[in-house]
C-alpha cells in the first residue's frame, strides 16, 4: 500500500517510528475492531470528562464545602488526560492504517482545540486566584 505525504507527515507528528507495527499483528478486521474500540474508549472518557466538569464538580463540590476555585486543578488534570487519550487513539489509528483515520482526525482536532482553550482558560483563572 502506497503511503501519501500527508500520512507520512501525520506519522511524524504522532511520533510513530517508520515501519512501526506497535506489536499489532492482526488481520484487517481485528485491527479495525481495535481502532474502533480505541475510539469508543476515547469518546467515553471525553463524555465522562464533560459530565464531571460541567455537571458534577461545579455543583457537588460547593455542597460538600469545597470552594469552586479548588476544582481548577482537578479540571486541568482531566483536560490533560482527555488530550492524552485523543493523542494515543490517533496514534493507534495511524499505526494500524485505519481506513477512517482522516475522519477521526477532524473530530480529534476540534476536540483538542477546545481542550487547549479550556486548559488555557483554567490556567489563567488559576493564576488570577
Image (spheres, rainbow, N blue to C red):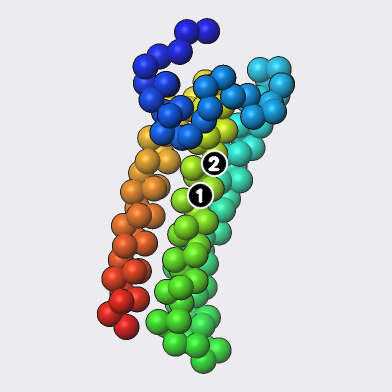
Q: Residues within 10 Å of mark 1 (few under 14, many from 20)?
A: some
Q: Is residue 32 left or right of residue 82?
A: right
Instruction: Please say if the residues under marks 1 and 2 sit with CB atoms less than 8 Å apart.
Output: yes
The reply to whether residue 103 is in sight is: no
Task: Identify the image quadrant of the C terminus.
Answer: bottom left
- The relative height of residue 126 versus residue 98 in the rendered view (above or below) is below
- The relative height of residue 107 versus residue 64 in the rendered view (above or below) is above
The residue at the point 58 percent across, 50 percent down is 44
Q: Nearer the viewer, residue 73 or 110?
A: 73
User: How far across and down, in percent of the image, does residue 13 sit?
Assistant: 41, 33
The residue at the point 50 percent across, 88 percent down is 66
Q: Is residue 55 left or right of residue 36?
A: left
- Residue at mark 1: 84
User: How far across and down, in percent of the image, does residue 43 sit?
Assistant: 54, 47
The reply to whether residue 123 is in sight is: yes
Q: CA distance from mark 1 to mark 2?
A: 6 Å
- Tag 1 secondary structure: helix
For residue 120, the mark is none
- Tag 2 secondary structure: helix
Q: Residues within 10 Å of mark 2 (few under 14, many from 20)?
A: some
User: How far across and down, in percent of the image, does residue 117 sit?
Assistant: 31, 57
Q: Nearer the viewer, residue 64 or 122?
A: 122
- Residue 26 figure quarter: top right
The residue at the point 66 percent across, 17 percent down is 28
- Residue 125 figure quarter: bottom left
For residue 88, the mark is 2
Amino acid at each position: 500500500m502506497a503511503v501519501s505525504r500527508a500520512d507520512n507527515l501525520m506519522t511524524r507528528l504522532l511520533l510513530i517510528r517508520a515501519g512501526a507495527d506497535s506489536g499489532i499483528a492482526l488481520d484487517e478486521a481485528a485491527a479495525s475492531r481495535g481502532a474502533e474500540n480505541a475510539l469508543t474508549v476515547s469518546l467515553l472518557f471525553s463524555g465522562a470528562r464533560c459530565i464531571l466538569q460541567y455537571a458534577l464538580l461545579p455543583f457537588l463540590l460547593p455542597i460538600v464545602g469545597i470552594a469552586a476555585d479548588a476544582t481548577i486543578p482537578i479540571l486541568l488534570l482531566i483536560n490533560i488526560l482527555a488530550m492524552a487519550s485523543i493523542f494515543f487513539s490517533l496514534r493507534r489509528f495511524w499505526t494500524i492504517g485505519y481506513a477512517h483515520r482522516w475522519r477521526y482526525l477532524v473530530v480529534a482536532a476540534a476536540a483538542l482545540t477546545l481542550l487547549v482553550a479550556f486548559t488555557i482558560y483554567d490556567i489563567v483563572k488559576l493564576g488570577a486566584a
